[in-house]
Each structure stands twice: as structure tokens, then as C-alpha cells.
Image: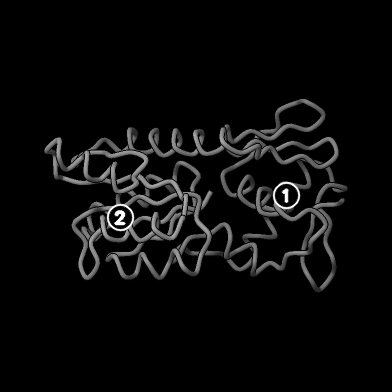
Amino acid sequence: MRLLLVEDDPMIGRAVRHGLLQAGFVVDWVTDGQFGQAAISNEVYDGVILDIGLPRLDGLTLLQQLRSAQNPIPVLITSARDAVRDRIEGLNAGADDYLLKPFDLDELIARVRALMRRQSMSTSNLMTVGALTLDPSRRVVTKNGEEVALTAKEFAILEVLLHRPGTVLSRERLEESVYGWGEEVGSNAIEVHLHNLRRKLGTDVIRNVRGVGYKIAE
């Protein structure tokens, strides 16, 4: 799952991004509201972690713009503003949750996962192709009813492929989908993850179209 972190404090931003990456999320981090606005316009995200006191465009204004445009993306506000009226204002503006700074990183990750679960309950998003099923909200993959243990990157690659069964996706497209901005990517990282996926799931599940890319077998 890809998240957008909009946070102007470099220390908080680095810590939150690192924690979310360790938890298996793909994270893009921007440092002001206008960059956040541009990122949401150009990328597809599963959720946004949004600070309120941002340069150039404040978080509440960005949130109000999203909801005015009927964008239903889940938004978790993080803010040092602890007055009840501030929390009410954030939730009334369209936030799905509100977390006060300073916060525990584990709590932030738990709240993000809770948002993802609530979002998935409103839509049937189980992905099934043949004997293979992926549950994004529980982060579980099964084959023939048996759970298959995958790393975070393996899960992310499989999720992208299952979104478009039968469609060939290039290595570059897979990299863009499963690595956040600024993450270091080894030259053969995608190939290594795909090799491990095929070993765990069977070579007939993911097919290599030579010179083009990879696809889930229909």
C-alpha cells in the first residue's frame, strides 16, 4: 500500500517514513501543502498522513480541497494542536482520524492499518486469480487455502500485478509502484523479489514476457 506523508519537520518526517517502510508500506514524503497537492494529483495513494501546520498551503485547506473534489482517500491528521476544538475542526474538515503529537510510532502504524481496514470493509477488495487470493487489509496471501509468507516488497509486487491480471508490467513500472521517492533500489532488486515470489507461489503464477515485463497468468 502506498502512503503520502505530508510533514515539514525533518526529524519527524524521517522517523515516520522509516517506521512505515519497516512496517511494509511504500511511502512518499513531501514537506509542504503545495507539494502534497501536486503529489495527490499525480500519484495514486491508499492513504495520507497529514500535518496541519504546513508551509505554503496548510493541511486543513488541502484536506478541504480533497473533500470538495469528492476525493475519498483516507486521511490521518497528525498535529500538536491539542484543543478539542482543533480536533473537531480537523474531523469536520474530512479527516478520518486525528493523532496528537508527540505520538508513539507504533500507535501511528496501528491507526494507519485501522484506516486501511475500514476502507476495505466498504469495498470488496479481495484479489483472486485461480488458486491465489490476496487480502490487502489483512496483508495475507493464500494459495489453495494455505497462507504463504511473503516479505513486504514481495507482497507489494504481487498486489500491483494482481490489480491487473493478464497485463504485462515492466520492471520500471513495478519499481515505481513498490518503492517510494528517494528509496534506494538495487539494479536487480525487482528480479530478485520476482524470483522469490515464483519460488513460493509456483512458476506458473507469474510469467516473464521476455523483453517486456511480467504478468499474472490469467
Q: Residues within 10 Å of mark 1 (few under 14, many from 20)?
A: many
Q: Name the residue nearer the viewer: 81 or 107.
A: 81
Q: Which residue shows up at 84% across the image and 69% down it?
A: 210
Confirm or deny contact between disc 2 and disc 1 (CB under 8 A).
no
Q: Quadrant of residue 126?
A: top right
Q: Which residue shows up at 80% across the image and 52% down it?
A: 216
Which amino acid type is shown beneath numbered disc 1?
Answer: Leu
Which amino acid type is shown beneath numbered disc 2?
Answer: Arg
Mark 2 lies on a secondary structure that is helix
Q: Name the residue nearer the viewer: 192 or 206.
A: 206
Q: Which residue is mark 2?
A: 14
Q: Which residue is mark 1?
A: 162
Q: Residues within 10 Å of mark 2 (few under 14, many from 20)?
A: few
Q: Earlier in the sequence, mark 2 or mark 1?
A: 2
Q: Quadrant of residue 139?
A: top right
Q: Which residue shows up at 41% across the image and 56% down it?
A: 4
Mark 1 lies on a secondary structure that is helix
Marks 2 and 1 sit apart, C-alpha to C-alpha, by: 31 Å
In this view, 45 is above or below 100: below
Residue 130 got which mark?
A: none
